[in-house]
Image (cartoon, rainbow, N blue to C red):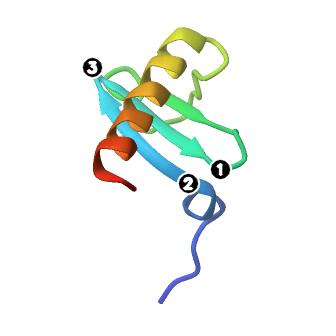
C-alpha cells in the first residue's frame, strides 16, 4: 500500500456543492476549489471566499451529525 500524502492524512472530510469542493482539515488548514474553473485544484480559494468556506464547512458538519461520523 502506498504511503498517504500529506493532504490525505490531514483530511477530516470533504464536501462538494455547486461546483465548490471543500477539503476540511483537522488542523484547520482547509482547502476550497471551484472545480469548473480550476479542475486541477491549483488555486485554493479558502481565504478569498470565506463565506463559501463557512457554508461548505456547515454542510459537512451537518452531514457528519446526521450520519454520526
The alpha-carbon separation of the residues under discs 3 and 2 comes to 21 Å
In the rendered structure, the answer to whether residue 19 lies left or right of residue 49 reads left
Q: Is residue 55 above or below residue 30?
A: above
Question: Crowdedness of circle 3 by 10 Å Cα count: few (<14), some, many (20+)?
Answer: few
Determine which residue is flagged by label 1: 26
Discs 3, 2 touching: Cβ within 8 Å: no
Q: Which residue is found at the position 29% from the left and 51% from the top?
A: 67
Label 1, label 2: how far apart the Cα atoms are: 6 Å
Which residue is found at the position 63% from the left and 57% from the top?
Answer: 10
Name the residue located 45 percent from the left edge and 26 percent from the top edge.
58
Query: Residue 21 or 65: which is nearer the viewer?
Result: 65
Residue identified by numbered label 3 = 18
Badge 3 marks a residue whose secondary structure is loop
Residue at label 2?
11
Q: Are marks 1 and 2 in contact (CB under 8 Å)?
A: yes
Q: Residue furthest bottom?
A: 1
Q: Is residue 49 visible?
A: no
Where residue 1 sits in the image (x, y, percent)?
47, 90
Say which label, 1 or 2, has the lower sequence index.
Answer: 2
Disc 1 crowd, CA 10 A, few/some/many (<14, 14-19, 20+): few
Residue drawn at point x = 60 percent, y = 23 percent: 46
Amino acid at each position: 500500500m502506498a504511503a498517504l500524502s500529506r493532504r490525505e492524512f490531514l483530511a477530516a472530510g470533504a464536501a462538494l456543492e455547486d461546483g465548490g469542493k471543500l477539503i476540511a482539515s483537522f488542523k484547520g488548514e482547509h482547502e476550497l476549489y471551484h472545480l469548473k474553473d480550476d479542475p486541477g485544484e491549483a488555486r485554493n480559494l479558502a481565504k478569498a471566499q470565506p463565506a463559501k468556506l463557512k457554508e461548505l464547512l456547515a454542510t459537512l458538519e451537518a452531514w457528519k451529525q446526521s450520519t454520526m461520523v
